[in-house]
Amino acid sequence: MGIRDWPEAQRPREKLLRYGVRSLTDAELLAIFLRTGIKGLDAVQLSQQLLEEFGGLGPLLGADQDTFCSQLGLGQAKYVQLQAVLEMAKRHHQECLKQDSVFSSSHLVKEYVRQQIKGHQREVFACLFLDNRHRLLAFEELFYGTLTEASVHPREVVKAALKHNAAAVILAHNHPSSGSIEPSAADRLLTHRLVKALDLVDVRVLDHMIVGDRDVGSFAESGFM
């Protein structure tokens, strides 16, 4: 039985229109994107199978082209479509953060940082540079490292903050090896050093975010700042 034969209230598109996008499961959202299934599987069944094979929505969305296109029901056209959708989401978040204070959009900031950094196979250290109303001026990836660490030079962070004429910054990096959002002792020490260095040029460090496999951790929310 295909999706068209389901009760109308259970079909993903009709369900979204009636109850809102948050009422849909990951498989139902993916099914709307895929639009069609394959022989023997409707779009929702195919989506559920893909989510199980990839280990969730995050790994599927972050898969490289070869891995993505190797799966049944996917291909180059779907990969291009997906990249366009993800890039539109990034740009939308960036525009929102340029208009509003990051303090009024903590979830948006986390999602923006996650989308910018996710998928990197090595550690990346980045900064969000903000104006005096805490709106986004620029996002910049400053340092790259190995699977477990990146060397961060406070002087270069200060130079970048001055270049963007920033009044405040949010620091961000990922943990590609462990996938954890818990800060290490080295993370805390680095944050302390950057706070001191940036304070010398009157730039406040508002937060330090850690991007893990499935979530984004915040120093400020965890009481580390």
Image: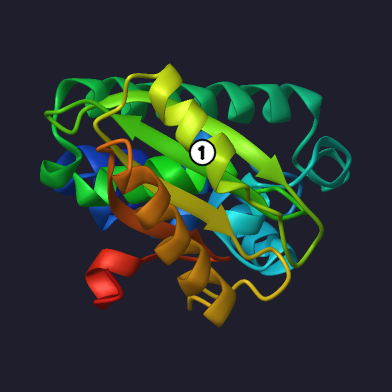
Find residue 15 and report its horizontal and vertical position in percent: 26, 47
Q: Looking at the picture, does residue 185 appear above or below residue 7?
A: below
Q: Looking at the picture, does residue 209 appear above or below residue 103?
A: below
Task: Say which residue appears at 15% left-offset and 28% top-offset.
Answer: 132
The residue labelled by disc 1 is: 157
Q: Amino acid at mark 1?
A: Val
Q: Nearer the viewer, residue 58 or 188?
A: 188
Quadrant holding the N terminus = bottom right
Task: Say which residue appears at 25% left-offset and 38% top-offset.
Answer: 202
Find residue 13 and report its horizontal and vertical position in percent: 34, 38
Find residue 195 and report its horizontal and vertical position in percent: 36, 55
Find residue 148 and report its horizontal and vertical position in percent: 75, 67
Colouring style = rainbow
Q: Residue furthest front?
A: 200
Quadrant holding the C terminus = bottom left
Q: Secondary structure at mark 1?
A: helix
Q: Is residue 150 visible?
A: yes
Quarter of the image where one finds residue 90: top left
Quarter of the image where one finds residue 141: top right
Task: Say which residue appears at 46% left-offset and 40% top-offset.
Answer: 127
Q: Looking at the picture, does residue 212 appear above or below residue 196?
A: below
